[in-house]
Image: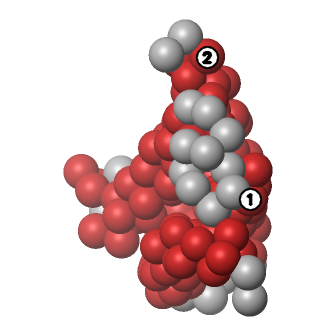
Amino acid sequence: MGTVLRFTAWRLLPVVLVAIVAAFWFNDIQQGGPYVLRNLVPLALLVLLSGVVLILGGGRWSGAGKRLPLGVVGYAIPALGLALYIHYAYSINLNEMFTDAAHPERVFEYLPFYTTVAGGIGFAIGWIVGRNV
């Protein structure tokens, strides 16, 4: 295994572990419902974007400049953060948010679209900030 590939794999490992833990937690909260796989798409995009940044950077986060790493952070904060928050709110019925809903689990049907769009906006903001650094 080459040095660049080893550094890429080593530095990508925390992102993959966070995605795996979040995926198991999403599955637990949704109780294996029909929307679990759909809710893993933003996590897969985060791992993919992180891998692209590390490959283009030669195994380093900032090896290819600041645009892409800041874009990935900009993607991760709203995409992963919003998904985690909504799953947490559902799990404890935060402020009785889901009490009167006829089908409260359907919040997970469209959540991946919202989190991916929010992540895309965050990526664009991070990209712009990285350009101006």
Q: CA distance from mark 2 to mark 1?
A: 19 Å
Q: Amino acid at mark 1?
A: Ile
**For the view shown, which residue lies furthest in the front direction?**
3
Give the x, y percent position of residue 43. 63, 64
Residue at 69% x, 57% y is: 58
Question: Which label was assigned to residue 131?
Answer: 2
Q: In the image, is 123 to the left or to the right of 97?
A: right
Specify whether residue 8 is in view.
yes
| In this view, 36 is above or below 31 | above
Q: Residues within 10 Å of mark 1 (few under 14, many from 20)?
A: some
Q: In the image, is 46 to the left or to the right of 132?
A: right
Sequence-earlier tag: 2 or 1: 1
Give the x, y percent position of residue 82. 47, 48
Q: Nearer the viewer, residue 116 or 49?
A: 49
Q: Which residue is mark 1?
A: 55
Quadrant showing the N terminus: bottom right
Residue 99, quarter of picture? bottom left
